[in-house]
Image (tube, rainbow, N blue to C red):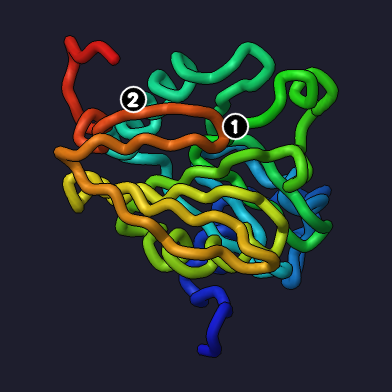
Amino acid sequence: MGEGETPDTEWVTAMATIEPTEHTAFPVAPFTVDDLLKFPDDGNRYELFNGSLVVSPAPTPRHQRVITRLLVILQAAAPPELECLSTVNVSPSNEDLYIPDLVVVPEQVSEAVDLIYAPSDLLLAVEVVSPSSKSHDRATKVAAYADAGIPLYWRIEPMEGPTVYIYELDGRTYAGPTVHKAGTTVSLSSPFPVSFDPGDLLRLRGWNP
């Protein structure tokens, strides 16, 4: 299997989730965004990278906790004209569709978007790494998000404390990443001023930002 190709198991998983009827025509690789919009809402996450399909299972409780904690932190710090959202569709072409765990976008843009954001709408994309997504979050999405022109990418590694890796766009590639570990305060100016301890992202109930 060459670099960037999707493992056969992922193709089989995707196709097996579609129950055929006499009126169903199975999409064939390479896939398009139009194909993905016909897939069932079965709890899986379907993404496209140059026509190759990547299927991820529903997030674990730990994964959801990190997303929720970060969403609360960002919402509390964001200026009123910006909006923090989770699991939105982002598409730079009809052969590519990404679903970041969290994004920051202008609120005015959100009002105009029906289903799919353009990469130029995003000020920040965040991915929380899980065992099923680590190769894509650490490599594939770094290249894809940079090529799409998303100015800021945060990769969060829950099993590292957690640790936050921050990539900033420098031309057509990301510089960095800069690394921020649990137990230290991250103070950032982009996409807006915000400070937090990465360790807060795994705190249990009763936590207040």
Image point 35% across, 28% down: which residue? 195
Q: Nearer the viewer, residue 202 or 150?
A: 150
Position of residue 21 measured from the top left corner of the image (x, y, whole percent): 73, 48
Image point 54% across, 29% down: which residue? 192
Is residue 56 left or right of 199 when viewed as pictured? Answer: right
* Snapshot quadrant of residue 202: top left
Image point 71% across, 26% down: which residue? 106
Position of residue 85 measured from the top left corner of the image (x, y, whole percent): 57, 26
- Quarter containing the C terminus: top left
Please state which amino acid type lies under the numbered disc 1.
Val
Position of residue 120 measured from the top left corner of the image (x, y, whole percent): 77, 45
SS assignment at label 1? strand
Residue at the extreme bottom of the image, as rendered: 2
Question: Callout 2: 10 Å neighbours few (<14), some, many (20+)?
Answer: some
Is residue 82 left or right of 31 when viewed as pictured? Answer: left
- The answer to whether the residues at label 1 and label 2 have Cβ atoms under 8 Å apart is no
Is residue 59 left or right of 75 when viewed as pictured? Answer: left
In this rendering, the answer to whether 184 lies above or below 193 is below
In this rendering, the answer to whether 166 lies above or below 197 is below
Mark 1–mark 2 distance (CA, rounded to whole Å): 15 Å
Image point 71% across, 56% down: which residue? 149
Please state which amino acid type lies under the numbered disc 2.
Arg
In this rendering, the answer to whether 175 lies above or below 167 is below
Question: Callout 1: 10 Å neighbours few (<14), some, many (20+)?
Answer: many
Q: Nearer the viewer, residue 84 or 113?
A: 84
SS assignment at label 2? helix
Q: Nearer the viewer, residue 135 or 151?
A: 151
Q: Can you tell which mark lies on residue 104?
A: 1
Tell me the residue that label 2 is attached to: 69
Q: Earlier in the sequence, mark 1 or mark 2?
A: 2
Position of residue 173 measured from the top left corner of the image (x, y, whole percent): 61, 68
